[in-house]
Amino acid sequence: MFIVGLTGGLATGKSTVLAIFRENGIAVIDADEVARKVLEPGTTAWKELRSFFGDEVLGSDGKVNRLRLGEIVFDDIEKRRKLNAITHPRIQSAMMKMAVSYFFSGHRYIVMEVPLLFETGKMLTFMHKIITVVCEDYQQLERLCKRNDFSEIVAKKRINCQMPLEDKVAKSHFVIDNSGDFSATRQQTESIIRTLRRSKFTWYFRAIFFITFLAVAFGVAHVFSNYIYNSV
């Protein structure tokens, strides 16, 4: 099995592309969904977040108000670092556990959506291929303002805090342009799916894993037999 990283900018359409992979029977890991689970009320991360930021970042249901939290940390680098220290290691750990589970379930590859894949660099080592989702600048701005009810000024500041899309494109193996209609995005995504299905890397990886497993098994058996022999 290998991992395909899916990234892009704010409101470029990563979730749309991820949904198309799901519809085609591909195992996916959504960083946003994982983050919500990591911050469920009562979890260790939730307790640490509440301890540091207070009830101000919680909604009436006790769940983290992510928009309010984003407002607090956006202009305060120290608070943003604290938030990342609380959440990022746990999110990454949960995502890798899911990946291992998919591996043992027999999936040839999985798609892992990581919005800040290039910015943090933490998960790059595990990615065999990388897909970046893009759209026109004006579309990204309009979509972000509509989705999060941001003013144009706030939306621009959020977008500019991430790596420019052209830099992400230069570091990627595939690019999906989500500027057009849904059918165009689907066509591009399914073309990539066909390419990934032809990849022989998964069989190479499984062969290496199998050989390593056999080597370890024979090594353990050899040590055990010597122990039994010397004990007699």
Image (cartoon, rainbow, N blue to C red):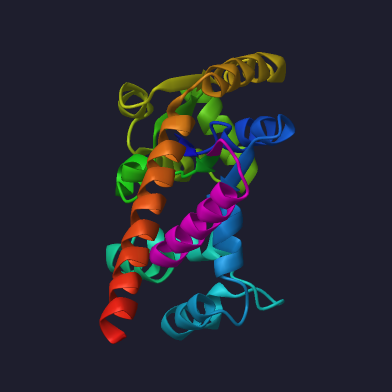
Q: Is residue 182 visible?
A: yes
Taking the spot 29% from the left edge, 70% from the top edge, the residue there is 223
The magenta region covers 88-110
Left or right relative to 19: residue 100: left
Horizontal arrangement in the rendering, residue 104 relative to residue 130 (left or right): right
Residue 4 sits above or below residue 211 on the image: above
**Does residue 149 appear in this view?**
no
Label the magenta part by its dominant secondary structure.
helix
226 shown above or below 167? below
Q: Nearer the viewer, residue 216 or 20?
A: 216
Residue drawn at x 53%, y 23% as measured from the top left: 196
Judge by depth and name the residue closer to the eye, 9 or 95: 95
The residue at 43%/58% (across/down) is 92
Res 62 quadrant in image? bottom right
> What percent of the width, then of the height, locates residue 189?
60, 21
Q: Residue at x 31, y 44 (%)?
A: 125
92 inside magenta stretch: yes
